[in-house]
Each structure stands twice: as structure tokens, then as C-alpha cells.
Amino acid sequence: MADENVTEPKNTTENAGQTTKTASQPQTGAKPTAVPSPANIKHHAPSPAAFAKKKPAHHNAAPAAHVAYSDEDVKQAESFGRVDDNGTVYVKDGDGEREVGQFPDASKEEALALYARRFLDLKEKLDVFANRLKSNTIKPHEIDESVKLLGEETKEPAVVGNVTELRAQFEQLKKDGEAKKEELANRRKEAVAKAVQERTAIVEKAEAVAAGLGDNTNWRSTADKFRALFDEWQAHQRNSVRIDRADADALWKRFSAARTTFNQQRRKWAQARDNERAHAKTEKEAIIAEANEIKDSTDWAETSRKFNELMDRWKKAGRAGRSDDDALWAKFREAADTFFNARQADRDQINSSEKENLAKKEELLKKAEALVPVADAKAAKQARQKLAEIQGEWDQIGYVPREDMRRIEDRLDAVDRQIKAVEDAAWKKSDPEADARKSSFEEQLNAQLKELDDKIAAESDPAKKAKLEAEKATKEQWLNAIK
């Protein structure tokens, strides 16, 4: 069977150099020169030149040369032809008859069989093309090329067989080819529309990202989003149907504009960030310089306040970049640690001294509290002298821990008040007007003592009860002093 892209010259045999008669030549006459031998006719192989010209098989999907036909198919084709005594082969074509070749040195049976098989070869090409039209992978240009080639081969084919039916089959294939091209065009149109829609979705995602840029944008993750969208765009270009250039260019222009917007905004942000970092670095370097100036100060309260102010300024200065921030913070922390470590060492020393002072004052308190109660003015005078000596020593000792200061001062004041109460009572006795007030004052004290007894009896809190009892003891001393 001949290759689909190798065509036989019209009204010629397959062997080069052979001359033929045209359809207008008479059926009888002189024998032409260079007539092929029967042996060559039987092999019926295309020449090397014909093979060199053949196109890829998928264009027309011609049957292979080794296809064998049944004797019934060959006989059926032979019924449409005849061979005269000169070896000229004719085929019934419509209402007439047409010469297709001449083989005078071969038997009539051999010549007729050869041209019948050539008919079946050509019909096989049409059948293969018909099957190819059913495929969804065929291209419109393949259809056009196949129709053109088959049209040339079926116009006046040098074959023996039902040429009329062959041409009718070809005409139907032409119609089927046009229908297939329309179907392919519609499918492509749908595929292109879908591809445009898919690529538009990528563009809209990019535009949405660009529209959402602002002060709170995470530029790193947003850059990752654009890279992913660009990868998606490229994958879509590789894997989807090619869309019209105008649509492709318009969509790319939108996508590129969104990326450009992002890149411009990111550059502005980066520039602003760099400016902020430079400003923050300058501010923090100034803070470090101030911290180094005061780090050796022993004015603990004032310098602590200044370091707190520097820390507030540090927090407000912003970030100078991770590497710069870490280095700057280490310098500031070094200056602050120098001061606060010195302050803590001083505090530790003071605390130790204050605890020693507290122990000394508590010993003095024992001596002072042993002076009361006093019975009369003479005892009060002696107690006052001893208390003055104790207070002098008290003042010389110095500070005690802050949490203990109020407690021990109150205890010393309580001793002073008890002695003073006796002193006041003695003074009132020597006062000319004391007798006039004595009775009234005594009555007031008795009333207050009775009220204190009631409060003490009702009080359950030990601390408050002890305070009331101390107040009662003082008033009792006053009462004893005026009697």
C-alpha cells in the first residue's frame, strides 16, 4: 500500500521513466517505449524519490504498504475496469470510461489486479482520514492539508474501482472536515474564554493585593504572594490554550501594573523604614552618650530618675534594625548596669548599717520603757532626765530600715507621753486655778476610763485592744497624779 503523502503522477505507473497514454489517446495503436516488466508491476513499490517527498503520516494517516486486501475486495474493484489487448487499463468513471495506464508485457489479470489494489489503497486513505476526523487531537490545518491532498488524488485517480463512490466519500469527508473544523473552532473559543477567565482571576488577585497595601502591610509575605501569583501565571501560560494576543497583552498589562504598584510601595516603605532606622540610631546613640555621662553618679535618687527618663526616650525612639538595635542596647545596658549595680551595692551596705542601728535603738527602747509608769512628780522628773539621755543616744545612732522606723518611734513617743502626763498633772496641782478645775477634770477622766473599759471589753482585735489598754494606762496615770 502506498504512503498517504506519496502521490502517483496522473495517468502514470509507479516506476520512473515509464511513458503513458492520455485519456484522449486511442485504445489501439503503437506500443509505447520503456514499458515496465511484469516483475516490476507485481512489486508495486514507490520510488526512492517518492519516499523522499512524503510528509509525516499523521497528516492523512495513510494505510501501511503491507496491508493485504481480500480477494473479494479486489474482484469488486476489478469489476469497474478492463484491459485491452495492448495492455491498456481503463476504468468506468461516471457514464464513460477513462484510461488509467498501460502494461502490455503483463497479463490482463496482473494489470487489472494492480490498479484495483491502488484503488483500495486510495479508499483506505479516505477511511483513515474519516477515523482521524473523530479524534479531538486533530488540528484544522491537518484537515485542510488532508482534504487538499485527497482532493488531488481522487480527482482523476489512476486506479480501477468504484471511482464515483470514492469521490462521493471524499465529498462527504470534505463536509465532515468543515464540521470538524467548526467544532474545533467552537471548542477553542470555549477553551480560550475559560483561559481568559482563569488568567483574569490571577490578575484580579494581584490587583486585590495591590489595593490592600497600607501601613500595616507585611511586605515579606506580600512579596511571597506576588511570586506565587507570577508562578501561577507562567504555569497557566505553559499549560493552557493560547489566548488571543490582544487579551493576553491587556491582562499582562494589568498584572504588571499591580506588581509595579507593589514594588513602588515597597520601595517607599523601605526608604521610610531606612530613614526611621537612621533617626532611631542617632537618637539612641545620643541616649547612650547621656547614660555614660551619669553612670558613675552617686546621687542615687536624681540619677535613677534620669535613667528612667532615658529608658522612656529609648522606647519612643523606634527600631534601628535588628543588628544595630542589639549592639546599641548592649551599650545602653552596660551604662545602666554600671549605675544600678553601684546603687544596689550602696543600698546593701545601708541596709546592713540600718539593721545594726535598729538593734541598738531597740535596746534603748527597753531602757526607756522601763522608766514608766511614774508615781509622782519627783519620779517623773527623774524619768525625764534619763529619757533625755536616751533620746540623745537615739539621735546619734542614725537611720533604721524604713519599715521599722514608725514602729520604734511610736514606742519612744509613748514613753514620753506617759512621763508628760504626770508632769502635767503635777503642774496642775500647783496652779492656783487647779482646785477649781480638779473636780471637773477628775470626773472627765473617770468617765473616759469607764468608756475605755467598755471598748476594751467589746474589742476582739488584739492590736486595737492593746492600743486601748495603753490609752487607759495613760489616763489612769493622769488620774493618780491629780489625786
Image (cartoon, rainbow, N blue to C red):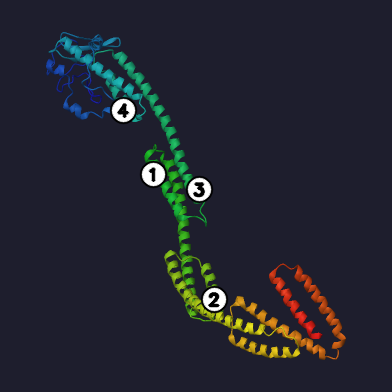
Q: CA distance from mark 3 to mark 1?
A: 19 Å
User: For the view shown, which residue lies furthest in the right direction?
Assistant: 436
Measured from the top left, where is residue 176 in percent x and y? 37, 22
Q: Residues within 10 Å of mark 1 (few under 14, many from 20)?
A: few
What number is the disc on residue 208? 3
Instruction: Give the foreground label among 1 and 2.
Output: 2
Of mark 1 and mark 4, the one earlier in the sequence is 4
Report helix, strand or loop for mark 3. Answer: helix
Of mark 4 and mark 2, the one earlier in the sequence is 4
Identify the amino acid type marked 3: Ala
Identify the amino acid type marked 1: Gln
Q: CA distance from mark 3 to mark 4?
A: 47 Å
Q: Nearer the viewer, residue 224 or 15?
A: 224
Q: Residue beneath label 4, please? A: 145
Answer yes or no: do the residues labelled 3 and 1 have beta carbons within 8 Å? Answer: no
Of mark 1 and mark 2, the one earlier in the sequence is 1
Of mark 3 and mark 1, the one earlier in the sequence is 3
Q: Residue beneath label 2, please? A: 304
Measured from the top left, where is residue 317 in percent x and y? 51, 68
Q: Residue beneath label 1, please? A: 234
Residue displayed at 45% across by 39% down? 198
146 horizontally vs 411: left or right: left
Report helix, strand or loop for mark 1. Answer: helix
Measured from the top left, where is residue 223 in percent x and y? 44, 52
Q: Quadrant of residue 60?
A: top left
